[in-house]
Structure formats: structure tokens, C-alpha cells
Amino acid sequence: MAELHTLAQALETLLEGVSPVEREIVALESACGRVLAEPIVALRDAPPFDASAMDGYALRAADAGRRLPVTQRIAAGTAPAPLAPGSCARIFTGAPLPPGADCVVMQEQVKASDGSAEMPAGVEPGGNVRRRGRELAAGETLLQAGHWLDAAAVGMIASQGHARVAVRRRPRVALLATGDELTAPGEPLPEGRIYDSNRYMLGALLPRFGFEVIDSQRVADRFDATADALGAAAQHTDVVVTSGGVSVGEEDHVRAAVESRGRLSLWRLDIRPGKPLALGRLPRESGGEACFVGLAGNPVSSFVGAWLFLRPLAAALLGAPALAALPRLRACAQFSERTSGRWHYMRVKLDHQRQDGVACAFSYPDQDSSLLRPCIDADALAVIPPNAEIHPGAMIDCLLLR
């Protein structure tokens, strides 16, 4: 019987020698969901000038408590004239403060008529003013290399005037589903066969991790077909992912096919689901190797394996180590479970509405690895150690999926 490897051993094997892919320059409009390949530096102070935080009147604080003539109107996007002592300016949110003014009084506190405005007393310098450089100073690092760009990050980059950014190209992946029992959705379903769910599930999940799926196909349960598909896929990808065919059955040809075309580095883990995971490398004729990840054929095994292995692999290829580990949360179990000699990764729903601030984890009653439906609503994977007995109220570790 082959040795069962730990998750840590598998990750070490998977990531050994993996380095970030090349960078490319993209328009900012296309940058959301990409990973920075180099730092973004602030080109200017933000805000770039002292600006009004609201609609109102700009003045010197020393002139407060009396009626002042309104000498100019300053809208956002205009350049104001210097403010004479003993006067005020009508100003609007985001507009630059005129030279000489040091505060803004909101319009609701001002009585204006006939070209002048009655100012309240007790106004402090700096009131309702967004100071230049409050958020960023020119030359300051805005975002580090390896940062995953979301909408807020893209907006911040745009606010500094950057129109293009250097990002890591998306790692290319080939997705091969093995099994003569598989039928593509939309086709008639012969007796004894099932629809191919794993290839579509993984094809939707992998781009979420940062991959670009450039090849997706079903492979016949034959050694030669499997070996040929693996060898061809490795030529134009960074990663080859298979679903099914890595167990010990007579129709499971993936492991032998990998060994015939490349090298198998590790097989079989001490986890449930996903025990028959296989890792290796497939050579390219042009030089270098593609990573190989063979996921188990049961849908939940593929789902869990993708989160535990393909996400960290994407993080390494993208040069984004912060994305490698799933966020971890301690939660109060609301279920009973007794584990065998393997680590269990249970699909759970979290309830964060506890008054004491501790999330509750609710298990789906049937955790069979063939049942994909619980994965739809699962918020997390509850990590249960081997040979453990969990009762309601026990504190457990959960890996967040959302």
C-alpha cells in the first residue's frame, strides 16, 4: 500500500521550483482581477490641493462671526483666485481652496443675501478642508507587486493618472476530464452514463483563482489517449489538470500516463475527500515543464482539491503569496462528527449572528464526496483532525471559501 502524504508535503511538492510567469502591460480598463507585477507609485499628492469637503463658504477663520462679501464662486475643476482678507468665496465639494482661505463653513450654517454672507462664530482653521497629501504623498508606494487588483485598487490607480499597469499574465491551464461514462451537457444521455460536471465546475473555478483555461476536453479511458492528451496539453500550458483516473481501478490510466510522459512526484493524501490526488511534471519540447495536478473524479473531491492545491499554485505562478492560504476562522461546531485516520474537510455553512461574536458552523448531513449540492451553499471547509470526535460546542478551524 502506497504511503499517504500530508497536505503540507503535497503543497511543498507541488510548489517546488515554481516561479512567477512573465509580466505584460494592460490597459487599466482590463486590470481588474489581475495581479500586479511591479509596485505602483503615487505620481502626485492626493488630494493634489487643499479641497473643500462640502458645499459652503471658504474664508479665513479669523474673519468668522461677521458678514463678509462673497467675492468669487469656486466649482470643482476651476482654479480660484486668491481670497482677499475680510471676504469669503462660495465653494463646492471637491473644489480647491483659494489661496488665503483656511477653512470652509457648510452652507447650512450661513445666511447669504445680496452678495454677502453672515458667518457663524467659533470657526476653526482647517475645518471642512481636505488637506493636500492627506491620503498619499507623491513618490509613495501605492500598491506592492503581488497585489490582486479589485475595483477599489483600480480606482486608486486611476486617481493617480496611470492608464496602463504591469501585471502577471494569466497562467495557462489545460483541463482534461477522464471517463467513458461522461457525456457533455446538452447531449442525449445514454443509459449508464452521467453528465460531465467536473470540467464545467473547474472551468468556472479556475479563472477565479487567476488561471486562463485555454483547453478543456474529455479524454477517453484508454492509456494511449490519456498519454497523448497529457503530452499535447503540456506543450502550451503552465498547468495540466485532470479530473478522474488517478485511483487504482483498471480504467484509471492517468498515473501511468503521467509517468510515461513525465514524472509523478506524489500520489495519495491523508485527506477526505480527495485522497487519490496525484502531482507531477510534464516536459515541453521547447524546454521547461508544466505542472501536473490530478484531481479525484468525485465532484466534491475535485472541488476541495481545487481550493487546497490549485489556488496556492495560482498564487505562486502569479507572484502573489498572500493569496496562497485560504482565510482561516475559528467557529463553534453545531454538529457531531467522528473522523478516521485522515484529515476531513467538511462543507459547512457559517452563521455570524451570534451575540458573543463567535461564528457557528453547521454541517450538511450527507458529506459524501459524490454530492456536489452542499458545495453550492458552503461558506467554508471545516478542518477536522484525524481520529477526532467533534460534538456541538467544540471550537473548530474553518477555511473560508467566500
Image: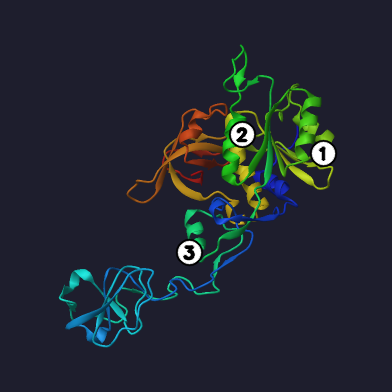
Query: In x, y percent, where is residue 153?
Result: 50, 58
Please tell me which residue is depicted at 71% across the width and 46% down the height of the picture: 14
Residue 385 location (% of width, % of height): 57, 42
Instruction: Look at label 1 and name its amino acid.
Output: Gly
Instruction: Examine the rendered structure and indicate whether residue 196 appears above or below residue 151.
Output: above
- The amino acid sitting under disc 2 is Ser
The N terminus - image quarter? top right
Q: Nearer the viewer, mark 1 or mark 3?
A: 3
**As rendered, which of 75 and 36 lies closer to the eye?**
75
Which numbered dot is residue 302?
2
First reached walking from the N terminus: tag 2 or tag 1: 1
Helix, strand or loop at label 2? It is helix
Residue under pointer 1: 262
Q: Residue at x 63, y 44 (%)?
A: 211
Q: Residue furthest top?
A: 191
Q: Is residue 335 left or right of residue 316?
A: left
Q: Quadrant of residue 244?
A: top right
Q: Residues within 10 Å of mark 2 (few under 14, many from 20)?
A: many
Residue picked out by circle 3: 159
Q: Marks 2 and 1, how far apart in space?
A: 22 Å
Cα–Cα gap, marks 1 and 3: 48 Å
Residue located 67% across and 51% down the image: 317
